[in-house]
Image (cartoon, rainbow, N blue to C red):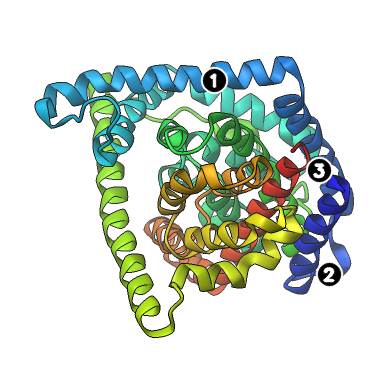
Amino acid sequence: MRFIFLFTGLALVFGIGWLVSSDRKNIKFKKMGIMFALQLVISFLCLNTTGGIQVLSSISSFFSWLMEQAAGGINFVFGGLVIQKGASVFFLNVLMPIVFISALVGILNYIKVLPFIIKWTGWALNKVARMGELESYFAISTAILGQPEVFLTVKDEIPKLNAKRLYTICASAMSAVSAAVLAAYMELVPGKFVVTAVFLNILSALIVSCIVNPYDVGPEDEITRDELTGEAAKEPFFQVLGNYILQGFKLAVTVAAMLIGFVALVTFLNSTFTAVLHISFTQILGYIFSPIAFLMGVPVSDITEVGSLMATKLLTNEFVAMGDLHQLASQLTPKGNAIISSYLVSFANFSVVGIITGSIKSISEKQSVSVAKFSMKLLLGATLASILTGTIVGLYF
């Protein structure tokens, strides 16, 4: 039965991707097959082997430890405002640690640890998938650095890209999440699903691009690894550290503002719909998205709740949906929990389309016009990538 739902989930992704494909005759089946096989290997090792489970547990424990270290700075600044154990203040306990994690990312970037990992992991991915040096490098970069910062790592190349290559890197940016927010996610959903989804999403975005946006990278279009990782002017250490800390704080405040607005809006809509139609807005969304959840392998008893969470993420953001899931988790089956937890780990929502368009515009006005033209296809592709990731994770539950 699990394999039947793996097939239906894949058929859903491929069918929708085929309908909106820019070149149906040249869909890259071989590249897709290689990357899908790699996803099966990764997910099997992560979720179905003792060693993989222990590694994921260690990673989750490490991020939990980082959250504890972040509490030192939070306690110093906010003092008695920090709620005692057993209660929670979302902004302090979940969002504020992003500042500390961002500082660590800055340090690792400054001492060339992250550039080394990105460079050679991207090289290995390109050797396996043959997606192109730029696409492979960027897919790994965005899973570590996040956006909009990740676009700055390829700012010299963006003006030179054709629309198809530009689509692929933007889809990767929407399908991945930054290392700075992983600890925050792990406060809301199980860490093993967060880490597994990060790995799978890198490949899911590229697989969907092979359907929606197929192309070949010729020798004349190829960008060498040395060009992508060339030395940049090095700023003083404490200036870099300060910049990353401020970026982390701005991110935390931005997420908090969006949560206040979106959660209040959803609450308003739920109250209004319940008063007028005797059914909440989120329940209506749940029924609309429930067929998709069913085809992904979500048990029938969970499809309405999971469908509602899928819609909430698309219309608001992943933090809002994860907050709702945190409250609902005990009511869902283990399989339903696994699929929706993995699905939510990405930036695929309407607001991020604007962020990406703005990021590209700051680098190239001309290219931002191209992004604006395919923005809805970009959101659809990133959502399909999340569906693919959730479907694969569901295979093991």
Q: Residue furthest bottom?
A: 276
**Element under label 2?**
helix
Please name which of the two marks, 2 or 3, marks the residue nearer to the observer. 3
Left or right of 204? Residue 271 is left
Q: CA distance from mark 1 to mark 2?
A: 40 Å
Is 359 situated above or below 354?
above
- Neighbours of disc 1 within 10 Å: few (<14), some (14-19), many (20+): some
Q: Is residue 143 visible?
A: yes
Amino acid marked by disc 3: Phe
Q: How many marks?
A: 3
Q: Is residue 103 left or right of residue 354?
A: left
In depth, the one of 395 and 156 nearer the eye is: 395
Q: Can residue 214 be seen in this snapshot?
A: no
Viewer-side residue, 174 vs 276: 276
* Label 1 secondary element: helix
Residue 50 x/y as whole percent:
73, 16
Read off the residue under disc 2: 24
Mark earlier in primary sequence (2, 3): 2
Identify the disc placed on residue 36.
3
Residue at which label 1 appears: 59
Residue 217's spot in the image, x, y percent? 75, 51
